[in-house]
Image: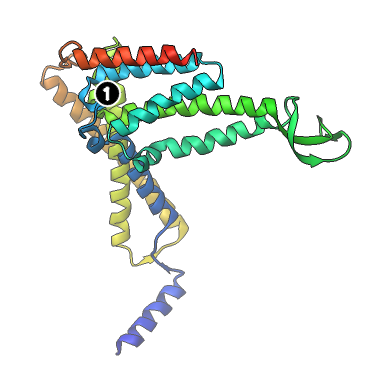
Amino acid sequence: MSDLSRERRFLDTAASRGLRPAGGTYVEKTIRELSSFFSRSMFREETARRPGLSQKVDPRARVLVTLLFLVSVSLARSIPELLAHAALPLAAIPLSRIRPGEFLGAGFLIAIVFSVLMAAPATLNVFFDGTVILPLIDNGREWRYGPYFLPAVIGITREGLLTAATFLLRVLTSVAAVLWLTLSTRWADLLRALRFFRLPAIFLQVIGMTVRYTHALLRHSEETHLGKKSRTVCRTKVAAEQAWVGSRIARSWERSLHLMEEVSLAMSARGFTGEAKLIGGPWFGAPEWGLLVAVVLFCTGAHFA
């Protein structure tokens, strides 16, 4: 029997049984992208090890100046003040050897899109009255849409633009500062720095274990899916696929419980009593105090812009 006839017979058998060739699915792409995004966002060891100016400062000082900066941004009321505040993270990012593509890919681009979508309705005179500077729809008279009354001319107002600009500057400046902190600080160092602020140890332990186990779950899901795909010749019916997914979920749950028990027993065997002992670094030196003073002076001057 020739190879062509064998292939023809195989395809006829698959068609008679309602099978389809296995291929790339949205599930596979979603799992892969989630795992990749999570790994890039939470485990940025490369950027944290670069010889930038901020990487040479103690992580506790970085967390402290970030908190002070966020408080200062929240207290800013005018656009010039917010623009002055925005200059600080824009200057800190290149000084930390963080590339623009890495900064945008870490979540800043998503923050821009969502912030613009949230601020866009505020620019119209549909919700709040104002001086229309750019008419969009002119009906000649006021009209009603359901329970709402709409003005005769719908357009972008000056007051709406000021409100949207204030919102965008405040949100994006705060997001930029937080991303600078996460990109320039290792995850373990960040948790250790938070302990400096007297946060409950159990809270930090739960956060750290949640991040690690979420990463492990995503990796396990991706490996399970790829393992099944490598052993699948043709697709089966939807009911069979759903049954397989249900069995894998149950298996993952059993595996999580077993792993939790093993980790708990291992920690108890090594003398763990519920309080994590973190090794603290030396007190602030000249770089840390210099950063604190510079940020405080900059934020104070920004409020007089």
- Rendering quarter of residue 210: top left
Q: Position of residue 125 (x, y in %)?
A: 74, 30
Residue at image point 32% right, 29% down = 182
- Numbered disc 1: secondary structure: helix
In the rendered image, the residue lying farthest to the bottom is 1
Q: Position of residue 252 (x, y in %)?
A: 31, 41
Q: Is residue 140 left or right of residue 56?
A: right
Residue at image point 53% right, 36% down = 114
Scheme of image coloration: rainbow
Foreground of the two, 94 or 35: 94
Residue at image point 35% right, 87% down = 5
Foreground of the two, 274 or 171: 171
Q: Is residue 99 above or below residue 13?
A: above
In the rendered image, the residue lying farthest to the left is 270
Q: Is residue 267 above or below residue 138?
A: above
Q: How many marks?
A: 1
- Residue type at mark 1 is Leu
Q: Is residue 235 above or below residue 207?
A: below
- Rendering quarter of residue 52: top left
- Rendering quarter of residue 12: bottom left
Q: Position of residue 67 (x, y in %)?
A: 37, 16
Mark 1: few/some/many CA within 10 Å (<14, 14-19, 20+): some
Q: Quadrant of the N terminus?
A: bottom left
Residue at image point 15% right, 13% down = 282
Q: Position of residue 11 (x, y in %)?
A: 40, 78
Instruction: Report the residue marked by disc 1.
Output: 190
Foreground of the two, 20 or 212: 212
Foreground of the two, 87 or 137: 87
